[in-house]
Image (cartoon, helix red, strand yellow):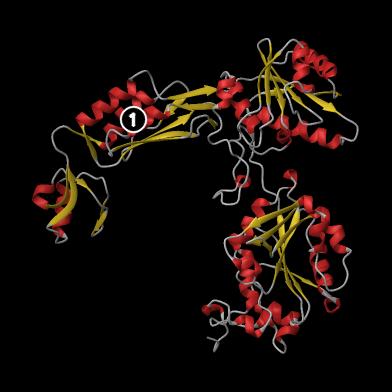
Amino acid sequence: MKFGPMPLDDARGGIMAHSQRVGETMIRKGARLDDAAISALRGAGRTEVICAILEPGDVPEDIAADRLATPLVSPLIARSRAATGRVNLSAEVPGLLRVQASKIDQLNSIDEALTIGTLPDYAVVAPKDLVATIKIIPFSVPGTVLTVAEALARQNGTPLTLHPFRHLKVGLVATELPGLKDSTTGKTIEVTEQRITQLTGSLLPPVRCAHDEESVARALGGLIAAGADMLLVIGASAVLDRRDVGPAGIVRAGGEIVHFGMPVDPGNLICVGRIKDKPALVLPGCARSPKLNGIDWILTRLFAGLKVTSHEIMRMGVGGLLKEFDNRPLPREKAPAMPRVGAAPRSAPTIAAIVMAAGRSRRMAPHNKLLVTDKAGKPMIARVVENVLSSNARPVLVVTGHQHEQIEHALGGRPVRYVHAADFSKGLAESLKAGIAAVPPECAGAIVCLGDMPLVTGRMIDRLLSFYDPEEGRKIVLPTFRGKQGNPMIWDRSYFAEILAITGDSGARFLVGKHAEAVAEVEMADDAVLRDFDTTESLTTLPVRMRPEGMR
């Protein structure tokens, strides 16, 4: 293929490289340069055009994409027609996609003109989900290159296989111990049923029993008699050994343990067994959470009719670190456990933002620090509120007190709700309580932001929000920089009553020590979460553009 600027006399029959408007005519990228197009270009005073000229043996992009896609199609995977050198492959049914990565790598290594992108191996897909895309990069491919790729794609069958989910009846045994809340067991059953339904299965009426192996065995036998295709046990106490209550109950019911534990976190303590031809699993404690964990990796394979052997489980370590960690670019909370089949995705909890803007600003008297304007004429409180509004926290409540009319004027037009703290002069606690009391009942909690911290960005706030998770015990979330605690802080609604009982000029930070088991510290990349600006001297340390006019 020739490519580049061509004299118009030589460009006839070529392929337009870049869209161009010529008078009233648009000659689009990829269009064939026929007599009419050449004439239009010449009439506009053009003498040459950038185009591609196919040479003998070259295969046009759409034909090449079509030919390469053909050997990649397999049962239950549909294909689109070729357009602009691309063919998309999509799932026809819910199931588990298997991808032979080595073969895809080989195909992509033949020539830079041929590209195949796929979902990861063992991806869960719903009907019409895109599973792969074939794209020819230039306008054509040498025929010899395409022939090699076709031959490799046909060797030993397609590298893409979709295993449809089977409708399985699942039996669940939930053991109980004194002190275990009934609501905890109920929620576990609800989450488990959601998992089963998403995989096109159905949950038989769950059986609750005492936490001993004989009771578990008896319950499993009853579920087998009721027609269960798969058996699950969730213990009142975490399983710690293959001889613990849950696994022992499987063995007593006539089964065996295939493997205990897995290199996936959360999910390390799963126990995989079987009773005759029926899979029997003892679930780890993390199965109480709807978020992705090791049980999902096992269940998806079983529903797809794939065997789960000890060897297979031991090979799950790479990619098996699912738990949130500090520098992960996409927090696990923002990604669904698996594509939902026939169900809407689970929404994140709503967190309100409370912006504290009621204080007297005594340390910067006679000025109100929140109304000090930067070089662009923007008050500090306006910059803080704009940062909060750029986050996912909603609604945004601004607590006012001292000079409340001026504060509201400075924020005019911004989508916030004002909460006036009538007793703001009695101390910080009164302003905080006014904000907490105004949080709408549908909000799971609130993030308390200080009005004199303009360097805290919306992305920082969203990072904190991503760590909030009551189900995993993260009910109080606060930022740190090099180990030092800062602001803003997230408080779960369960602590609102304690906050409303605070008096004086102290905030709620003392509750952090009282509820240390519920605290999640999030290390931040810079010290913005430690820097408030409540003195004239401190303003000199702001970025230059944010300093008041006349201050270097």
Along the line of sight, the residue nearer the viewer: 30 or 238: 238
Amino acid type of the residue tagged 1 in the rendering? Gln
Q: Position of residue 252 (x, y in %)?
A: 78, 12
Q: Residue at x 81, y 71 (%)?
A: 431
Q: Quadrant of residue 436?
A: bottom right
Along the line of sight, the residue nearer the viewer: 353 or 283: 283
Q: Position of residue 506 (x, y in %)?
A: 82, 70
Q: Residues within 10 Å of mark 1 (few under 14, many from 20)?
A: few
Give the left or right position of residue 548, taking residue 183 as reference: left
Vertical side of 365 occupied by 82: above or below: above
Q: Residue at x 63, y 29 (%)?
A: 262
Is residue 43 visible in this depiction of the protein? Answer: yes
Give the left or right position of residue 239, taking residue 43 as reference: right
Give the left or right position of residue 159, taking residue 542 as reference: left
- Quadrant (top left, top right, bottom left, bottom right) of the N terminus: top left
Please identify the residue farthest to the left as the structure is shown: 9
Along the line of sight, the residue nearer the viewer: 398 or 538: 538
Is residue 443 visible in this depiction of the protein? Answer: no
Q: Residue at x 13, y 46 (%)?
A: 12
Number of labelled discs? Answer: 1
Q: Secondary structure at mark 1?
A: helix
Q: Residue at x 13, y 55 (%)?
A: 48
Q: Position of residue 130 (x, y in %)?
A: 47, 35
Vertical side of 391 occupied by 272: above or below: above
Vertical side of 368 occupied by 438: above or below: above
- The residue tagged 1 is 106
Q: Position of residue 241 (x, y in %)?
A: 73, 25
